[in-house]
Amino acid sequence: MILAEFAKFLQNNEQEIIKKKSCTSLLGAWIKSVLEKKPKSNIEKIIHKEITLAKNKVGDYLLVAKSESGRTLTNALYNFALSYEQHVLKKWLQDKKPSDF
C-alpha cells in the first residue's frame, strides 16, 4: 500500500530521476512532504505513526523511525527507491548503443 503510493510519486517524477536526481533524495522529499501536512489517508497516518522528522536550526532534517516496524518500513522504502532507480536506468539504457557514449 505505502510502496504503491511511493511508486506513483516516483513515476510522476521520473524525468527528475533521468536528470540525475536520486530516488533516495526523492524518498526523503516525499516522506517530508507527508509528515509536514495533516494526515488524510491511511497511508499518511501510518507514516506519521512510524516515522518522525527531526530538524536542526540550519534547516536540515533527519528521518527517524519511531519503532521496529518504522525501521522496517524505512528500510523497505529505501530499498524500493534503489531498485526503482536501477529500473529507470535500465529502461533508459535499452535503446542506447556503445557509440552513444
Image (spheres, helix red, strand yellow):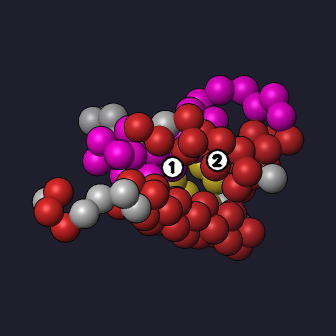
Q: Residue placed at 36% from the left, 57% from the top? A: 95
Q: Are marks 2 and 1 in contact (CB under 8 Å)?
A: yes
Q: Report the front residue among 56 and 11.
A: 11
- Would you say 44 lies left or right of 58 here? right
Helix, strand or loop at label 1? It is helix
- Would you say 20 lies left or right of 75 here? left
The magenta segment is 16-41
Can you tell which quarter of the image residue 61 is in? top left
Give the residue type at disc 1. Leu
Specify the quadrant that holds the C terminus: bottom left
Can you tell which quarter of the image residue 75 is in? bottom right
Q: Residue placed at 40% from the left, 61% from the top? A: 94
Name which of mark 2 and mark 1 comes first in the sequence.
2
- Would you say 20 lies left or right of 6 here? left
Residue 17, placed above or below residue 78: above
Q: Which residue is mark 1?
A: 27
Residue 58, placed above or below residue 23: above
Q: Main secondary structure of the magenta part?
A: helix
x, y percent for residue 99 = 14, 63
Give the residue type at disc 2. Phe
- Would you say 71 lies left or right of 39 here? left
Helix, strand or loop at label 2? It is helix
- Checking the image for residue 6, the label placed there is 2
Can you tell which quarter of the image residue 100 is in? bottom left
Outermost residue, right direction? Answer: 42
